[in-house]
Image (tube, rainbow, N blue to C red):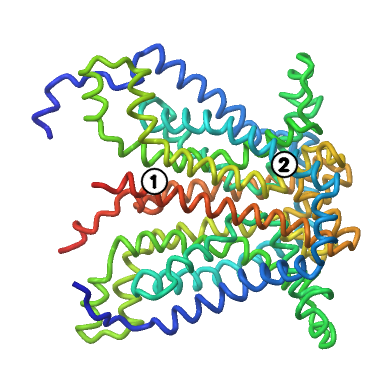
Amino acid sequence: MSNLSTRRKPPRVGDAPLFRRSLIGIVLVLVAFVIVAPLVIIGVEAFSKGWQLYRDTVVHPDTLHAVMLTVLAALIAVPVNTVFGIAAAWAITKFDFWGKRFLLVVIEIPFSVSPIVAGVAYLFVYGLQGLFGPWLDAHDIKILFAVPGIIIASMFVTAPFVARELIPLMQAQGRDLEEASTSLGASGWRTFFAVTLPNVKWALLYGVILCNARVMGEFGAVSVVSGNIRGQTNTLPLHIELLYHDYNATGAFAAASILALIAVFTIIAKVALERQGAGRVRKQANPAEKTS
Amino acid sequence: MRRRNVLPGLPLSLGVTLFYVGLIVVLPLAALAFKAASLGFEDYWRIVSSSRSMASYRVTVLSALGATAFNLFFGLALAWVITRYRFPGRRIVDAVVDLPFALPTAVAGIALTALFANSGWFGSVLEGFGIKVAYTPLGIMIAMCFTSLPFIVRTVQPVLEDLDPALEEAAQSLGGSDWTIFRKVILPLLAPALLAGVSLSFARCLGEFGAIIFIAGNQPMSTEITALLIFIRLEEYDYQAAAAIASVLLLAAFFMLTVTNWLQARALRYTVKG
């Protein structure tokens, strides 16, 4: 294609300088107003009463407890969803079975369901008025309005994250490499760790990071099942709401700044992983170049 | 030419998948549906068609429509600018598009409220024009706009990147103006992806909770969204009403999921021609 580049390319549609400049201008202004301004105001409000108050809020025992609980939820929900995502991707992309398309739709359901609806649904499983509630109560097992409830509600909301990244990529990569590996005598586990995993590692990490961000930020589902007990079942997003409704806006923004920072790091990690080719599988689904 | 599958691990991987999906996704939703169904038709209908419920559907759906319409234009313009133009800061713009997904909804909610309150950066300016955003339906719309913006950008962007320049060149050589080519050549090619993005965005708006409750006034009959009404019924220990109204949102979600899947299947049929 290099011999063509000497020819002057005709301007493409929308390349007229005036149109181009005004469209870029309008979009940049809207991005600044709609996306960047909310991020900036978090920092501004958090420090509006000085560094001291910011520090006091962040190191307050209630805030620290909320941070710990948020991290705990992520430490459990993210690995579980990762194992699920890998299992689902392996089953769906390496085998053909009846009902596969339906299973794909079911896995994606949590994306479409309102987090509040998810929270209510869990009440009717583990709550006193739910399926297992009376049994759990009789055996003195607390799930709702306690830490386990927070963790399983987070699992629901983020269930599809890892699977969604792995399935299109593993679909595009096909089965040839794994089939070659097992026909040469490698076990299934060895094939997975030595052949499949290296090929999907960036996509896997990408899904894990997005899953983690969502677990740490989940609000609706968690606020239904947590019971909002200060210093006990408050995750960081719930703690923000609590401070905000206590007329401690500065404190709420200080706590929010921790989550905003995590969001910024998530985006930086996402961009770095996209450079490695993660997250853009659907458009380069070209199995031909995989044959070597 | 179908080959015999030699790979191991189907029972384990499918078993784990079905067990997890069953326990985490299907069981709770089935329990909710069961609870709502156990109400009996008359009670169910009385709850879901009460004037307060109806008002909440109205404000939720109208705000979602407004937000999605705005995002249709803004999202398309944003995707267009990122893929077709080269300018300083383009990569940064491309990256920050995902901020609404990465930023927790509660954080977005208090940030937008601070911006649009009467004393806020935007609120004080808009106040001069007599426009109130915070604690009005407009505020609900803005919160929905923020949280659902990336859907349209990210579904249109790949299609825009893969657009064959030869199609435009052919249209240009036939003497079409830019606007005509956009309307008659480019837009029809983008349409399936745009529609899929719109339906994803609309579905997200219908279920959004965290970003909205801070900026909406949460007044029954005017600025109370359906998700909040469910939450309020729970706090009143009215579990039957919560189940009934939640089942309406769940049905809406399933409807949107069906629409989205259908649109995406159509979009794929048109783009994967090679």
Circle 1: residue type:
Ala
Relative height, residue B181 to residue A240 (above, below): above
Horizontal and vertical percent position of residue A104: 47, 65
Marks 2/1 same chain = yes
Amino acid under label 2?
A: Thr
Q: Position of residue A102 (x, y in %)?
A: 48, 67
Q: Which residue is drawn at 85% across and 43% down?
A: A248
Q: Which residue is drawn at 76% across and 33% down?
A: B137
SS under mark 2: helix
**Which disc is residue B267 wearing?**
1
Q: In this view, does B192 lie to the left or right of A150?
A: left
Q: Residue at x 71, y 44 (%)?
A: B211
Q: Which mark is residue A61?
A: none
Report helix, strand or loop for mark 1: helix
Chain for numbered disc 1: B
Q: Is residue B84 above or below residue A146?
A: above
Callout 2–callout 1 Cβ contact below 8 Å: no
Taking the spot 46% from the left edge, 20% from the top edge, the residue there is A23
Pick the front one: B266 or A85: B266
Q: Distance between the residues labelled 2 and 1?
A: 28 Å
Give x and y (percent) for residue A270.
46, 50
Mark 2, residue position: B60
